[in-house]
Image (spheres, helix red, strand yellow):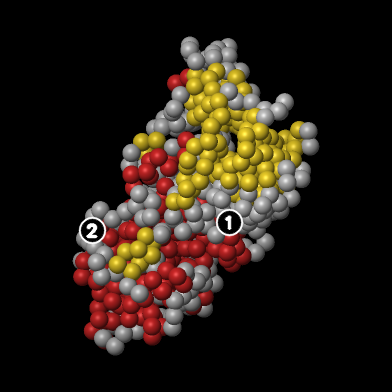
Amino acid sequence: MGAEPTDLATRGRKAIPLADTRDHGNLIETPSLPSEPLDDGPALSDLSPPRLGLVDGAMRFLYARGVPARNLVRPFHKPSRLRLLATVDEPLPGERAAGMALRAGHFLIAGKRVSTDSADYSSTALAPPIALALHGFTWLADLEAAGTRDKAAPVAEDVLRRWLLANGEIGEGPAWSVGHVGLRLHNWLIHAPLILSGQDRAFRASVLKHIAKTALWLDRQAPRATSPRDALPAWAAVTAAGLLLPDGKPRRLYGEAGLIAALGDAVGEDGGMLSRSPIDQADTIALLLRLASCYRACRREPPPQIQVMLSLLSPALLSLTHADGSLGSWQGSVPITAHRVSMLTQMADPRARPLQAAQHWGYHRLSARQSVVQMDAAPPPGAREAKGACASTLAFEFSHRDQRIVVNCGGAALAGAAIPRKIEDGLRTTAAHSTLTLGEADSTPVEPQGKLGAGVRAVTIERGHEDGRTTLTASHDGYVARHGLFHERSIGLAADGLTLVGEDRLTPRGRKAKRGEHDYVIHFHLGQGIEIGHEIAGDSGRGWALAMNDGSYWHFRTDAAGLAVEDSLWVDATGHPRQVRQLVLTGAVGREGGAVGWSFRKVG
């Protein structure tokens, strides 16, 4: 049945490198910042497998090595009748609009409509967000939110019949990736009344048998998951099956150990997912909340490690909230709504507050009055932790009240739904983020099929105060190999939140960079609804007046040699691409490097 999950003490706890102690010539290395103190709150060191007595430890050990649960729990009795032992309450209501769309005959997945009648449930060419929804049955929560059981159950049963016709053979076909199976089994168990309430007794029995066989398959496959995105839902589903199916204690013990080990591998010391994806962060919180609901349905308390992890994950997620409470667009994510973020974090840990300096999570935050700045001050995630990572080092987002002023394009993770797949890699590039590119190259090269090349390895970050502003100063080495130049960015937010001052510097390694001129481009993607007004000029530089949705005005100024306005796009919370504008600064530096200053200032 696969190897026993190893103790967390022997599993690698990975951390994103933030600083390098090697000599980088003129670059001044600054100490990496510690995470915001949690007042003796939970830490990753609290994540150790549940301590078991001799009998339970032996039970888990033997089950992990293939001994059937019945032989461990009821060795001299007939097999227990196959049934679900409890009904689980969904703790996180789905999207009613998506559920109503299902009742009308089509899935609504990341902004794309897919007919339930014509969907190809056996296709090997489904885009990732479509495959996740169809094979993970993530739509069940939406359907449950769209009406009473007598209205929703026939729809769920119809889709399930179609899916089983295409994917009923255990372990065969594209629907049987470990991550999809974990999500699917977990959702079937939680939303069992929707798929087991029909009048066809033979179909109900066949679905129960399929659930049981799926759980057995997942017992064997969960230890083989190669990424946290697959391992976490797989182990959560194994644990849920141990709670809700008969003779489940050995499976539950086995699943708990595997889940806790997988969490230790997936999460950094400050509670940020090593994938650095806000979507993954939110999905992991949701996964654990749903699993906790399975425990409550069985009148059991979840292992304390589940709450430890929820209390670690929540502050890191909140660190990426804007002034309106919604999330920033990082690592291909979309701006998850304030309502969803609040629901997740309030249920996970009502006392959670945003981290200001998340060392391993890699995002740093400035806030003043009604303004928020978010900055990516870490290398992109590794290939094991994330597929489709983005080259966004030293990018930032800026918001005031309900208005996003500077954004990143976002949305690469949802390519193939409303976002065309042909622009997926473009959305992952450095130019799709509000930062500097050098020589028309990415700070970390973006490659096809979700891969990244060799680029940023070391990032330094320092927080300080200057002229009444709180500042972040960070640098990375992504352009050193190609140009011999470090990129350093300094951002300062005034105490009233109404002025943001920045400078981008290109600093040579050693005394001089490589020969020739080095052309740079700095992108500032503007938030939706911002209108670019008249051009402005003065002693502090030239730029534009920016008109916000709420009727206020901001001025953008810079001393860059070149200044232009170009079209861009921003992917909204529903997964739809929206046309926006971007401010583009251009110029060149020689072997000695150079600097470009810029600012945003509210003027009315």
Q: Looking at the picture, does residue 541 appear above or below residue 355?
A: above
**Would you identify the image quadrant in which residue 181 lies?**
bottom left
Q: Would residue 383 be seen by someone viewing this image from the given angle? A: no
**Residue 184 picture location, percent across and down:** 35, 66
Instruction: Name the amino acid, label 2.
Output: Ser
- Tell me which residue sits at (47%, 40%) in the image: 567
To which residue does mark 2 refer?
Answer: 123
Q: Secondary structure at mark 2?
A: loop
Front position among marks 1 and 2: 1
Give the quadrant of residue 223: bottom left
Q: Which residue is mark 1?
A: 326
Quick one: SS at disc 1? loop
Give the mark nearest the N terminus, 1 or 2.
2
Q: Nearer the viewer, residue 511 or 498?
A: 498
Q: Say whether residue 291 is left or right of residue 554.
A: left
> 261 or 278: which is nearer to us?
278
